[in-house]
Image (spheres, grey):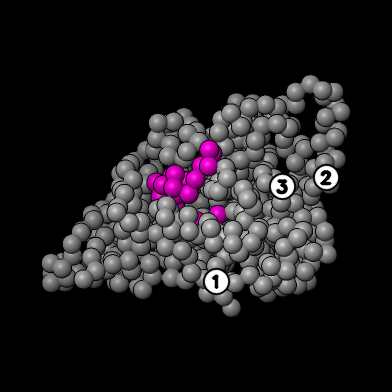
Amino acid sequence: MAKKTLIENASILNEGQNRRGSVLIEGESIVHLFEEKEPIPESLKKQVEERIDAEGLYLIPGMIDAHVHFREPGLTQKGDIRTESRAAVAGGVTSYMDMPNVRPLTTSRAAVEEKLSIAAANSLANYAFYLGITDENIEEALHIDPSIVCGLKLFLGSSTGNMLVRDSRLISRLMKSRLPIAVHAEDEAIIESNRKKIEASYAGRPIPICMHPVIRSTEACVRATKFIIEEAKRSGAHLHILHISTSEELELLKDRSGAERHITAETCPQYLWFDDRKYETLGARMKCNPAIKTSEDRKALLRGLSDGTIDTIGTDHAPHLLSDKEGDCLHAASGTPQIQYVIPLLFELVKQGHLQAERIPTLTAHHPADIYGISKRGYIREGYQADLVLVDPNQDTTVTSEGILSKCGWSPYEGETFTSSIVRTLVNGVTVYDRGKIIEAVSSPSQPLKFIRG
């Protein structure tokens, strides 16, 4: 008989509402939601094997992070599926979708199947993988079995792994795919031109990290984002624009009509927390692609969380060793570990007045589930998988190197204190994280994500 677990007296943030209630889990599924005044039968209480008192806590659907780089295979000195999935559940992330720029690149069905096998043996969170797009694999991408990949990843700007696609004719063909197409949108020609100008001006001297947003400029982001939006409008392609970093891109997204909601957009926690004034103190620790830009861009992105311009939050979790971060603007690696602190950071934005708490599940769970067609996850509903997170809004989380679970061992948030914390994380009804401790089991409760494809 499946184990029964009862989470009692929680403030349930779900589907735009905050309602006090209790949730009954049987096995891996949610079987009943009790409203605050709805009595829980005594006979049922006797059948429950585990009762979790959630008084004073928020209960939210586990985050579905549609944008991570867990570095396996081939780059496992930085991170791997085992270590990074544990950092994920500690951060309230119960499902993730991993990017293809590893070694070898995930650009074939065989490579996807290899990663699925690795995750089945090692992941503590639910998982799915993108197929990466290159100049050579468009035909395979158009005919890939839609049940084994979460989507296609297209790089319009170079980044870790060098999967850049420049040929607009190939991109137009790719727009025929019925799968979600997740796009890194930066114009490579503008980046190359900016780089040459900066190199010339420094005449062989080290280029400071603060030049990163000058090289990978607003113009580079806007031109690529405008191009790919126009392609998607013409074709009707299912487009998801990753890591929006500028106010100008938000203006392009505001032009979407109701019929164009197949074009969606993500931003990431680093763009909501930092701006270019922090390069002086954080340096390469906050260097990522696209670059973190101005305080005005940050303010616009914060507004976009609430007004619906931004559809999802993805972490772009991209661990590097600190040794990879050494060097000047052209040589320090781009990418930062984010996944363990994303939910406390978002609740901090609530306390700062930038966001309503009820909006957090929409950005982190509901919309990712809807955009990618994920079956029975992303909501607290009867019959759905019990991927759930309890958050204490009044318990501090101080980021220290000792508490970091990502293999790289550092965070750009070290020294920050967020005034909320993850108390417990359940994956498919099983507690995998509880008050600072990873709960290991004989076998992992994680599962591959299943997709409903129209």
| Badge 1 vs badge 3, beta-carbon distance below 8 Å | no
Residue 117 lies in the magenta-colored region: no
Query: Vertically, is 386 above or below 349?
Result: below
In the visual, does 182 lie left or right of 117?
right
Identity of the residue drawn at 18% across and 65% down: 48
The reply, left or right, for residue 280 in relation to residue 189 is: left
Marks 1/3: CA distance? Answer: 26 Å
- Residue identifier under label 2: 190
**Which residue is located at x 51 percent, y 51 percent?**
355
Q: Residue furthest bottom?
A: 454
Residue type highlighted by circle 1: Ser
Label 2 or label 1, whichever lies nearer to me, is 1
Displayed quadrant of residue 277: top right
At horizontal 23% and vertical 54% (from top left) the residue drawn is 53
**Front one among 209 and 296:** 209
Find residue 17 and report its horizontal and vertical position in percent: 42, 63
Which amino acid type is shown beneath numbered disc 3? Asn
Label placed on residue 222: none
Which is more toward the observer, 439 or 302? 439
> Which circle's residue, 3 or 2, is located before the other in the chain?
3
> What are the residue bounds of the magenta stretch?
76-98
Mark 2 or mark 1: whose residue is earlier in sequence: 1
Give 213 or 138, whichever is nearer the viewer. 138
Residue 94 in the image: state x and y as whole percent: 42, 56
Disc 2 element: helix
Q: Which residue is mark 1?
A: 147
Q: Left of 412 or right of it: where is 426?
A: left
Helix, strand or loop for disc 1: loop
Residue 79 is a magenta residue: yes
Q: Which residue is mark 3?
A: 162
Q: Residue at position x 42%, y 55% from top?
A: 121
